[in-house]
Image (cartoon, helix red, strand yellow):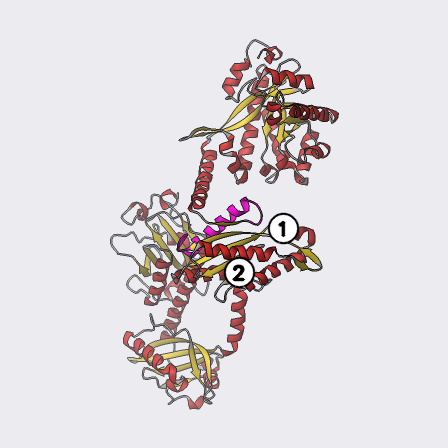
Amino acid sequence: MKCPPVLPMETERLAALAEYGLGSDRPLPSLDVVVRIAAHMFDVPVAAVNMVGNDHVFFAAAAGFAGGDVDMSRDASFCAHAILQDAVLVVPDASRDDRFHDNPLVTGPSQVRFYAGVPLMSVGGHALGALCVIDTKPNHNFSAVDGERLRELARMASDRLELRRVELFVERDRRTFAEPERRSPTAMIRFDESGKILEWNLAAATLYGYDVADGPGLTLETLVPEHGRPSLRDRIAQVVAAGSVDGVTMPSVVYGLRRDGAEFLLSASLFCWHENGVLTFNAHVHDLSALRDEKDALKRLASTDVLTGVANRASFYRNTEITSASMTGAAVVIIDLDGFKDVNDTLGHEVGDGILCEVSRRLTALARPDDTVARIGADEFALLLPGVTKTADARLFADAAAAAIAEPMVIEGFDVRVTACCGIAVAPQHAHEALSLISNADLALSRAKHHGPSQVFVFVESLRMEAVERRVYNIELHRAVNDGEFVLFYQPQVDFADGSLTGAEALIRWRHPQRGLLSPAAFLPALERGPLAAAVGAWVLDEACSQAAFWRRHGAPAFRIGVNLFGLQFRIGSVVDEVIAVLNRHGLPPQALELEVTESIVLDDDVVLDALQRLRDYGVGIAFDDFGTGYASISLLRRYPLSRIKIDRSFVQAMVESQRDASVVRALVDMTRSFDLRTTAEGVETAEQRDNLRQLGCDEGQGYLFGKPMPASEFGAMFNIGRSRGWGEWNLNRA
């Protein structure tokens, strides 16, 4: 168990904590509502405000805590770790966390698995404790949005703690106004439990339109409109009965009454103390009427997309949550503009902004009064359609939206046409909770975009299953990297002129612990799109070069190894420095390595072009894989520093039966020869294919005719590398 360290200013922190007058036997009732909200919001059995003392912790408030034999020591406390940082501390599974896996709160009766906590700070910036939510089940889905919600509740808790501190301060301090209070710009009113005003300062008298001398003798109800007096009497009675303002909340809207009869909006903070056995009150009053318009404007700004004037992402999520809670059902349609980035790049951002505004106007024109139109991304919009519970009806809305967007528009003098894809999810059929509903609509949008522009797709459960499978698969890929489950196989490459072995291509395989040996088709697409591609690519490069160096030292002095590169390797770090370092580490000359790239990696990318040019200048071979299948392949022969092309297997396997494919192969060989490049044909499986390729002038071949991809040990045994026979004696024309 990792014990939490003591903060550098621990003495000052404990002094700040003492100002709140809290202890294990002195909880703060006003915090009860905060922890109840937290437990309900995050659907957890336990939520608490936990204060961190010198060597122990104690609850200022707790929901779902049944008591019992629980370790309340500071060393065992999760919250003692939470106060060490500003961010939300999230522990998805404590049993798998090095800090907590052997903690008594995890191994004992409490069985804590999930924890999320936010530090609660004093006005002086010292961490007092933490608001936390706890579960006995792991939770790997606690999102950034969840963290921000927990922070909001922590701010509510901090406000109530500060009210407690101020109340204690007032109770300890002088019981009548001193000169600073009399001159304070904050309106202060002292009154007794019957509501009779004992004293007020100049700011309070001015606020209500009186002279200071008019205060004593007035009743508090004089300062409140008729409709607000029952509520005032009720709250004073509650405080008198409890002897404290803890747990007594002021109404969200409070009005004051000036001497001339005018009403105004105000906020009030209420404090009380016992003076000679008599309960005395002090109210701090702020005039909010001047701020109301400004606040309304800020509220609109906070919920509105500045560019288009429709709702923003936060407002859309909030409205969806409110609609979901009403249980009336709703549909969410997420809309993505097709190719908007290209329009932005070619016509400029002013035209792009104009398109977004026009799309917003068209969607707003389609919307019903209770619908929400929002811009939730750069070129992404959303519709919230309350009461639409049938997928067919939601589809009609989506089709109408897509059709409206597709109508021609004139922006900044340009005639523009844009199209859009739509994803649809309907509550309660597809989800009950707001975030799930939006997520499902987003999954449907992804499927729509997969089918091309102007597509509309309705969510189906298989999309969620596929997303879960992708996430699980990505977790497995991380495990495969960490546990060394990837291996390299080697497929021989042969010189057509004399049949001798020239080298091999290193091909990755995955030895999955449950599914056995997986071919690249089963995992490479996911690996190439994910963040692990660079790390795996670096391992492949190092492992292949290590094996090639071994074979060159043991009877194959001219052996060349082919290694495929991932696109991400050109984006992270320096692939040039990495290649040179690997060659030096294994003592390989540059010509012993041939890096294979595809059109998807190199096409129109100056970063890739520069790296390949530097590698070619160093002496490393550059092979263009699957040549002949891409539309830009010929132009790449001029621009890129290639040393070899590899003719795609689809042409090779059809060339015997198809004169057209044979002509394509002949043209490719002739063209590459004119660029002084070498050629390797992939997928050679028959002697007839080999003979035809040799007759056409192709330099080398690779395929099952010469050997399938195989482990290094089998490869070495097959070609007797390191034994008595020499490198040049292994003629494969005998096949």
**Position in image of residue 150 (x %, y %):** 42, 58
Say left or right for 76 vs 491. Answer: left
Q: Which residue lies at the image location 65% right of the left edge and 49% below the top edge?
A: 342
Q: Quadrant of residue 239?
A: bottom left
**Vertical order, 260 against 240 (above or below):** below
Q: Mark on residue 405? A: none
Query: Residue lying furthest top in this view?
Result: 724
Q: Which residue is mark 1?
A: 341
Quadrant in which the N terminus appears: top left
Please name the residue shown 37% across and 66% down the image.
20
Q: Position of residue 362 (x, y in %)?
A: 58, 61
Q: Classify 535 as above or below 379.
A: above
The part of the image, by quadrant, that contains residue 59 is bottom left
Image quadrant occupied by the C terminus:
top right
Tell me if I can see residue 217 in this picture.
Answer: yes
Residue at the far left: name it. Answer: 68
Horizontal and vertical percent for residue 345? 67, 51
For label 2, the residue is: 374
In this rendering, does residue 51 appear at all? no
Residue type, numbered disc 1: Lys
**Residue 491 falls in which quadrant of the image?**
top right
Instruction: Return the disc, 2 or 1, that comes first in the chain's sequence.
Output: 1
Give the secondary structure at mark 2. strand
The rendered magenta stretch, by its main secondary structure, is classed as helix
Is 202 on the left or on the right of 600, as rendered?
Answer: left
